[in-house]
């Protein structure tokens, strides 16, 4: 799994499942093929899960998800003894219910911990020990040895500042890290085409507009965190349905642009996070973004 030609063939096959991301795929594969664990740091919707799923499918191993939060105790990660069976039969390895860490170690899977920086310190320490030793001593169960493909992959959102802790340097010094950011507009348009699978005649116009207004949410001064490409995917899907319901053609400029605004409200208003210091509704901010695209600079948004 780790000789150069095998890894390079893996890289090419994994790349076939994603739009772009060649560099991120190559760097992540290099880390995991080297036997290392890694933190992927980036905003939501930036292909972290898609990439990991493609890699674990390529390797034929499980991908296990865990969400990092204050309730993620070491016991939840490692597993627990079934309490009613313990009462009946006493502690035994048989009535141990493995948690995701133990399961990933035993099956040689990737344990994917989202929002890693929300997990409590003692949980992070348990993880670091498992990562360093590649085995885990579980009281009343014994020593669990990790299969060779076991990895811990963590993710963090750099915009996330509520309920997170800054990782201590004793933790960060034990981790590899890769930052992933939004892709460029042509790549996002390809992603939207791939995922929304637009079929109608106005789809071409919609894809470009959806990606443009979604990207504008990431630049707007009142928005702390804008929408990922997921917003653009949903915008196109919703707008296509609306166009059908209202019998609108893309050549009907005025009705088309109103349709885009309505679809923006549905697809984007819940996905943008307004700056706490500003008193404005998501709908009003979206209206501004819409005006920028369709009223102030209409040439940008004309078809063709
Ligand atoms: N490069 C890409 N190629 C193909 N599809 C992509 C790509 N990037 C994102 N997508 C699509 O966009 C959506 C979000 O991607 P994904 O779930 O991988 O993001 P994520 O980084 O795991 O987000 P989160 O941090 O919120 O979990 C999915 O529907 C995915 O299929
Ligand atoms: Mg994900």
Image (cartoon, rainbow, N blue to C red):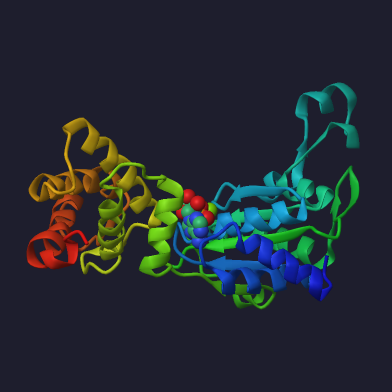
Please state if 209 lies on the left or on the right of 172 as rendered: left
Residue 251 or residue 89, whichever sits in front: 251
Please report the residue visible at 89 percent of the width from the left and 24 percent of the height from the top.
89
Please report the residue visible at 76 percent of the width from the left and 52 percent of the height from the top.
109
Which image quarter: residue 51?
Answer: bottom right
Residue 33 position within the rendered picture, expressed as x and y whole percent measured from the top left: 77, 69
Please state if 294 lies on the left or on the right of 78 as rendered: left
Instruction: Check the image and name the residue furthest to the top.
Output: 88
Residue 84 or residue 247, whichever sits in front: 247
Residue 266 position within the rendered picture, expressed as x and y whole percent measured from the top left: 26, 42
Please report the residue visible at 64 percent of the width from the left and 74 percent of the height from the top.
27
Which image quarter: residue 36?
Answer: bottom right
Please state if 269 lies on the left or on the right of 237 as rendered: left
Q: Quadrant of the C terminus?
A: bottom left
Total count of labels? 0
Residue 136 position within the rendered picture, expressed as x and y whole percent measured from the top left: 84, 55
The answer to whether one can see residue 236 in this image is yes
Residue 118 or residue 109, whichever sits in front: 109
Please state if 95 lies on the left or on the right of 177 as rendered: right
The answer to whether one can see residue 162 in this image is no
Q: Quadrant of the N terminus?
A: bottom right
Residue 134 position within the rendered picture, expressed as x and y whole percent measured from the top left: 84, 62
Please report the residue visible at 63 percent of the width from the left and 53 percent of the height from the top.
53
Which image quarter: residue 287?
Answer: bottom left
């Amino acid at each position: 799994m780790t000789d150069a030609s095998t890894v390079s063939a893996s890289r090419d096959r994994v790349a076939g499942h994603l739009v772009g991301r060649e560099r991120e795929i190559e760097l992540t594969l290099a880390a995991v093929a080297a036997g290392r664990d890694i933190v992927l740091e980036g905003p939501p919707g930036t292909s972290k899960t898609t990439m990991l799923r493609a890699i674990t499918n390529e390797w034929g191993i499980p991908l296990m998800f865990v969400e990092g939060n204050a309730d993620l105790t070491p016991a939840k990660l490692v597993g627990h003894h079934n309490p009613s069976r313990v009462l009946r039969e006493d502690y035994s390895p048989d009535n141990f219910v493995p948690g995701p860490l133990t399961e990933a170690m035993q099956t040689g899977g990737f344990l994917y911990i989202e929002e890693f920086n929300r997990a409590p310190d003692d949980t992070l320490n348990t993880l670091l020990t498992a990562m360093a030793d590649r085995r885990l001593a579980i009281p009343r169960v014994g020593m669990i040895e990790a299969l060779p493909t076991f990895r811990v992959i963590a993710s963090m959102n750099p915009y996330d500042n509520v309920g997170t802790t800054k990782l201590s340097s004793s933790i960060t010094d034990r981790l590899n890290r890769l930052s992933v950011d939004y892709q460029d507009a042509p790549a996002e348009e390809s992603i939207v085409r791939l995922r929304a699978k637009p079929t109608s005649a106005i789809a071409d116009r919609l894809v470009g507009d959806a990606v443009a207004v979604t990207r504008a949410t990431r630049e707007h001064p009142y928005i702390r965190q804008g929408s990922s490409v997921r917003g653009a995917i949903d915008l196109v899907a919703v707008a296509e349905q609306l166009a059908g319901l209202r019998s609108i053609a893309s050549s009907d400029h005025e009705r088309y642009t109103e349709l885009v605004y309505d679809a923006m409200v549905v697809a984007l208003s819940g996905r943008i996070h307004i700056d706490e210091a500003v008193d404005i509704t998501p709908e009003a901010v979206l209206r501004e973004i819409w005006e920028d695209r369709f009223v102030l600079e209409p040439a940008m948004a004309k078809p063709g």
